[in-house]
Amino acid sequence: MIEIRRVFTHVEHIHHEFGPRAETPLVRGAIGAVLTNPFAGRYEPDILPMMALLDPVGVDMAHRLHAAMDVPLEQLATYGKGAIVGADGELEHGALWHVPGGYAMRELLGWKGSRAAYTAGKAEEKTGQPGNALSIVPSTKKVGAPGTTLDVPLTNINASYVRGQFDAIEVRVPGAPAADEIVFILAMSTGYRVHARVGGLLAKDISKWDGLR
């Protein structure tokens, strides 16, 4: 069911935004895996079995993206995910990425909870206190033609309301997705927008256990 055609990686270093050169550039990265959509061209009532099969894809992509960004793990400060579904698929196929993509990055960054419990939706089994990556991973998805762009949102890994780290990275995989494909995307950055200066909560002031609120 999982058949990957291409993996596309994009990394950028932002030194300034028309102001003074930043002492340390903002590093933003995204990775997209182009997969065959097994449900293309038909309505399948039960698509959940594919979600579990995407788990190792998410883990591999998270590690690949970290390696491509070439920064220490502790410098990764924001994350986001997304999906572009080819024209013969439906938006719900992109939603299969929520658990495999999101928890792959959270676990890479130190989250210690129970992914299986969250997938099952059993509140009483949601045990295991996370050590990091407490925030929900922001997400977006769309159905589109080959070359469609997607603005993937980025927010702080421990508190989504760190205003200076609200951001997005534009992702486009040339020639993908074909009508019977899906592009699954992960994105991360090292933090603040270059020249962020609109106030709000700072990452250094986060109480670690507030991230899920």
Image (tube, grey):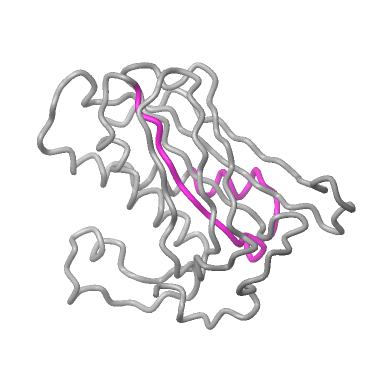
- In front: 212, or 102? 212
- In front: 18, or 86? 18
**Magenta highlight on residue 72:** yes
Is 55 positioned to the left or the right of 32 in the image? left
Is 107 positioned to the left or the right of 204 in the image? left
Position in image of residue 198 (x %, y %)? 68, 64
Give the farthest residue toward the right. Answer: 20
- In front: 144, or 7? 144
Q: Quadrant of the N terminus?
A: top left
Q: Quadrant of residue 12?
A: top right
The residues colored magenta run 61-86
User: What is the number of callouts on the image?
Assistant: 0
- Please give the name of the residue rendered at 54% of the width and 49% of the height, measured from the top-left corner: 63
- Please give the name of the residue rendered at 51% of the width and 49% of the height, measured from the top-left corner: 153
Position in image of residue 174 (x %, y %)? 54, 20
| 28 relative to 31, above or below | below
Position in image of residue 145 (x %, y %)? 41, 18
Is 176 positioned to the left or the right of 164 in the image? left
**Magenta highlight on residue 92:** no
Position in image of residue 88 (x %, y %)? 27, 19
| 176 relative to 190, above or below | above
- Please give the name of the residue rendered at 89% of the width and 53% of the height, measured from the top-left corner: 20
